[in-house]
Amino acid sequence: MDYEFICNFSFKTCEGKTFKLNEFNFISQYIDKYPNKNRVIESKKVAMFYTLRDINALSRSKTFMQKENTNTIYVTQEKYSLYCYVDVFKAFLPHIPYYFGNCDVMIDFKKFKALESCFVKASEEKILSPEILQYFKDLLGVHYENSKM
């Protein structure tokens, strides 16, 4: 069993649904998930974000932070919208089934780019547009849970 095998493995849930990890794109391809102070010049920092391990950890932790600590990720302007995406993703955790808990945050990068300004606005103003609601329904497909939130 290797990484490729796991990515292509068809997981079956107790609810009778199936998924493969390779059916999703993950945020770790685009952002730093762990402290990056040694790689980002402080003058390029526009925000600070808490360490991001997986969906379960996101549910228990902060996103954007005001005070720096050992778990701080420096966010640059180039990546700011992606961290806003994670902040908004957290608001949708009630719609994400338990079996994705150990996964990284999922993203449809092409659709995200089309709605990029909507994600920034939603993160900053804490108001979710109908386009963002539809984005997450499309992203999760049959795995989107309607019963919560």
Image: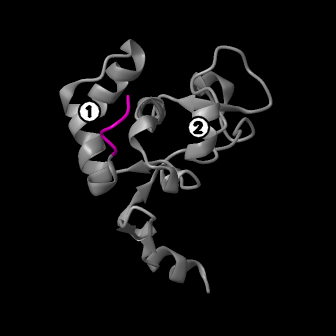
Task: Between residue 113 and residue 18, name the one nearer to us.
Answer: 18
Colouring rule applied to residues: one colour
Q: Residue at x 54, y 55 (%)?
A: 103
Question: Could you tell me which secondary element the residue under label 1 belongs to?
Answer: helix
Task: Between residue 68 and residue 5, name the one nearer to us.
Answer: 5
Q: Which mark is residue 90?
A: none
Q: Is residue 32 part of the magenta span, yes or no?
A: no
Q: Is residue 39 above or below residue 70?
A: below
Q: Is residue 146 part of the magenta span, yes or no?
A: yes
Badge 2 amino acid: Leu
Q: Residue at x 58, y 26 (%)?
A: 44
- The x, y position of residue 56, in whole percent, is 60, 44
Badge 1 amino acid: Ile
- Residue under label 1, please give it: 132
Q: Is residue 16 visible?
A: yes
- Residue under label 2, please give it: 58
> Left or right: 90 with respect to 42?
left
Which segment did they paint magenta? 145-149
